[in-house]
């Protein structure tokens, strides 16, 4: 595990026992201490925080609360690095994406550094729309990514939660697109994935009218998975993450790839096929091909059944 002081994969915080009828914890008081996470900083960044729990949850926090967690090129570069770290860390099973504080998840691109062709880093001077790379990274991350949303998820910040696999919202969350108001639009995942989530008419309404939607409205239209009091947001998000950590990581990985396969076209099929290949590599049939090549002999595949 790269750059991390925590080396053991332990289960210090087991899942709370749940009432099978209500799915609520049987004894919320006694489970309180078991659910609070201990975050360890894995790497220092400027615009983001990258932390993890001992039991396999990574948390990426956009840390620019003074601009409602708007992203600038450096923010995006660091998010890409953190997502790579989370992907490559075999102890990480779930990734949480969030914003610092309770005012905003993310307010999209930093309008102060928006130039003619995109967002401009003063050092680089090259205009970029690199947040699109982050969106793709979240989509292809072979682990669930959970958006933990308090406050505003607006513009490109809204698209970020849309591309996450699940969204847990605080009751103060506010969602919306503002592109046509501020002179931009995201016709990629920002349009297609949103339409898949809430339906085409609703997605067009969100983009064409630039209205804001509170957490209750977001839940009603299927934009988020759960709404909880803002004080409970992290606890509830961690609870959802730990439920997933208790499940088969490869089944979750294959499911994620399957959900995206048709929507992402050849890239989606590539991801799913890659996952199938990973499994195939472990079979005796695949090993026979490799061993035959190394031994300079003709492979004998006759021993393997042609399954129905
Ligand atoms: C988030 C809002 C609703 C919060 O309102 P609130 O709570 O009243 O706070 P404010 O007083 O408005 O804000 C506090 C301080 O934060 C600054 N600030 C807020 N958001 C931004 C931002 N996005 N960029 C820069 N600064 C921001 C305020 O200026 C204020 O600063 P001070 O204290 O100094 O006055 C409200 O703030 C709001 O509506 N914000 C703007 C939302 C917005 O327009 N976002 C950009 C939308 N566009 C994108 O995200 C583009 C995404 C993108 O990259 C892209 C992707 C695909 C294809 C194309 C693009 C593309 O860029 O074109």
Image (cartoon, rainbow, N blue to C red):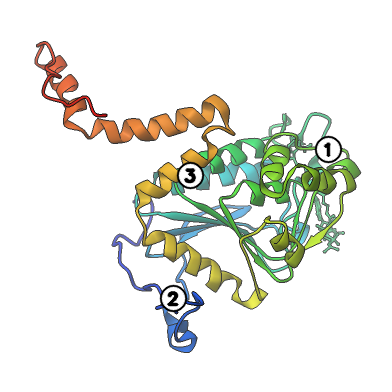
* Residue on which the image places disc 3: 256
Q: Is residue 175 above or below residue 272?
A: below
Residue at left 55%, top 43%? Answer: 138
* Residue on which the image places disc 1: 184
Which is more foreground, mark 3 or mark 2? 2
Q: Is residue 239 above or below residue 299?
A: below
**Distance from Cα at disc 1 to Cα at disc 3:** 29 Å
Residue at left 53%, top 73%? Answer: 235
The picture quadrant where one finds residue 30 is: bottom left
* Disc on the earlier residue, 1 or 2: 2
**Distance from Cα at disc 3 to Cα at disc 2:** 26 Å
Marks 1/3 in contact by CB < 8 Å: the verdict is no
Q: Position of residue 264 (x, y in %)?
A: 57, 32
Residue at left 56%, top 70%? Answer: 234
Is residue 204 shown left or right of residue 224? right
* Disc on the earlier residue, 1 or 3: 1
* Disc on the earlier residue, 3 or 2: 2
* Residue on which the image places disc 2: 20
Q: Is residue 295 above or below residue 169?
A: above
Q: Position of residue 148 (x, y in %)?
A: 61, 61
Instruction: Identify the element where label 1 is drawn.
Output: loop
Instruction: Identify the element where label 3 is drawn.
Output: helix
Q: Is residue 121 visible?
A: no
């Amino acid at each position: 595990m790269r750059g991390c002081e925590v080396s053991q994969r332990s289960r210090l915080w087991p899942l709370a026992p749940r009432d099978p009828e209500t799915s609520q914890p049987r004894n919320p008081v006694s489970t309180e201490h078991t659910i609070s996470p201990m975050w360890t900083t894995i790497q220092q960044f400027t615009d983001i925080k990258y932390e993890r729990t001992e039991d396999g949850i990574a948390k990426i926090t956009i840390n620019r609360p003074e601009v409602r967690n708007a992203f600038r090129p450096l923010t995006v570069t660091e998010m890409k690095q953190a997502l790579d770290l989370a992907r490559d860390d075999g102890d990480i099973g779930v990734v949480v994406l969030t914003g610092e504080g309770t005012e905003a998840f993310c307010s999209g691109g930093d309008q102060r550094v928006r130039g003619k062709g995109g967002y401009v880093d003063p050092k680089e001077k090259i205009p970029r729309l690199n947040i699109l790379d982050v969106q793709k990274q979240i989509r292809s991350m072979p682990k669930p990514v959970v958006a933990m949303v308090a406050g505003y998820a607006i513009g490109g910040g809204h698209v970020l939660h849309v591309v996450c696999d699940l969204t847990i919202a605080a009751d103060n969350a506010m969602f919306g697109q503002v592109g046509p108001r501020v002179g931009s639009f995201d016709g990629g995942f920002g349009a297609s994935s949103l339409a898949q989530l809430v339906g085409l008419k609703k997605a067009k309404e969100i983009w064409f009218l630039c209205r804001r939607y509170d957490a209750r409205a977001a839940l009603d239209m299927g934009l988020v998975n759960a709404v909880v009091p803002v004080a409970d947001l992290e606890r509830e998000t961690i609870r959802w993450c730990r439920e997933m950590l208790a499940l088969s990581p490869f089944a979750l990985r294959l499911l994620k790839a399957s959900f995206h396969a048709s929507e992402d076209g050849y890239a989606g099929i590539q991801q799913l096929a890659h996952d199938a290949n990973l499994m195939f590599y472990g079979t005796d049939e695949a090993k026979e091909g490799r061993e035959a090549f190394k031994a300079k002999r003709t492979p004998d595949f006759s021993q393997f059944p042609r399954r129905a």
